[in-house]
Amino acid sequence: MDWPPRPLTDLASEGDVNLSPLRKRWEAEQLAPATRELLADDARYFLHQSLSTPCFNALRSASGIWLEDVEGRRYMDFHGNSVHQVGYGHPRVVEAVKRALDTLPFSPRRFTNDAAVTLARRLGELAPGDLGKVLFAPGGTSAIGIALKLARLATGRHKTISMWDAFHGASLDAISIGGEALFRRDMGPLLPGTEHVPPCDPRQCRFGCNGSCDARCADYIDYVLGKEEDVAAVIVETVRSTDVQIPPQTYYARLREACDRHGTLLILDEIPICLGRTGTMFAFERYAIVPDIVVLGKGLGGAVFPMAAVIAREGLDIAAERALGHYTHEKSSIGCAAALATLDVIDDERLCARARELGERAVVRLQAMRARLPQVGDVRGIGLLLAIELVDPATGAAATGLAEQVLYRCLAEGLSFKVGQGNVVVLSPPLVIAAADLDRALDIVESAIASVA
């Protein structure tokens, strides 16, 4: 039932690859010899892999929305690997971690601790419906593995349905359900039974949506579930963060109905977008549905400690005789303290509402940008997760070269962000950002697009 994605030879879907000539040129123009020597040492001692080693710069500090490199340049960080909802070094998160270090720096797995129990209870209270059972993991990829195993145990089935171009982590099980060639190519054999279907993407719909989604892609999943009777779970990024694809309400309503009808679990991956990024604590709250399992990560550790969680409905507490995770840092007193402080900051500083308000304001600005610049083919936003899709004005084709040029021009002006799917400028600022700084960042992006175009 697989549906071909972009060609497997296209390894630039993530953008910002570390062998790019533009990156090398940027380093030569921007970095001092001492920094380049540090980068050479980085390349010497780390195994090389795309998107990280070799790196293109070196940092010495991070605070609030800002990164500072070893030469003293500051960058507004609109990338942050999606960990920085409350910004870097938030005093409440740092203080909570310091207290944990002073009292309980490590909690062996056979013991529990107050921070872990409190965090599990709070996540269960925050999650809608009967999502009330929790497991922690040291990272999102590990949490995805827990969710997959739980789905197999609960259904007695092993197959999954996920999306082409999806990203769920970098381990073998995660790339099996993921759909990016950069992670999958030459890595087989992968997990058996990992079927892929087209994502909900109105601009490139395989079902004739013509830019206005009528959720036929959800109907196709319903069809596949009817043909593939041994599907344990449908796994979806609620909003695909790599290029900010925002399905309509009808998509998840039909998907939830299809899963219920076929006895299949619905697993939502919110690792990069949970905790207020989309304007609600969980992105799926905007769709008025409740999954069987939701996976959180990244920002849960407050941009300090690696932390992830699986929240499942009460009826899935069925694995008392099995090991779903069993990770060394499963109930980390430090990670749980950081997460509790993060939840307090999100609540007390009204960051969900702030993301909605600033995001709506930013989308208005992006729409005006699109009207002025023919290279902007589309703009999208949900909360403070924003996208600018760059195209060739003459053909409408994806402008991958332009997106990379815009990235390095913006870095030179003090703004860092991610390029997704090769031609999408993805802006994901900390939710604590001031309105004036957000405006300044959008000024930098617009100027860069205009100048390099």
Image: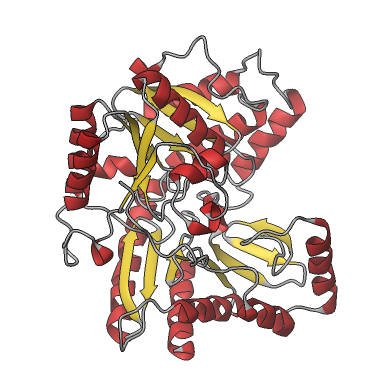
How far from the left and from the top, in percent, is residue 138? 61, 34
Which residue reaches farthest top? 321
The residue drawn where x is 52% and y is 65% is 11
| Residue shown at the point (77%, 67%) measured from the top left | 70
How is the structure coloured here?
A: secondary structure
Residue 352 in the image: x percent, y percent? 38, 47
Q: Is residue 21 above or below residue 200?
A: below
Q: Nearer the viewer, residue 354 or 141?
A: 141
Indicate the quadrant where residue 97 lies.
top right
The picture places residue 266, in percent across and down from the top left corner, at 31, 33
Judging depth in this view, the residue of 434 and 16 nearest the camera is: 16
Where is residue 35 shown, x and y percent of the image? 80, 72
Q: Is 39 situated above or below 300?
A: below
Q: Is residue 198 above or below residue 451?
A: above
Viewed as shown, does residue 179 lie left or right of 49? left
* Any part of residue 140 in sight: no
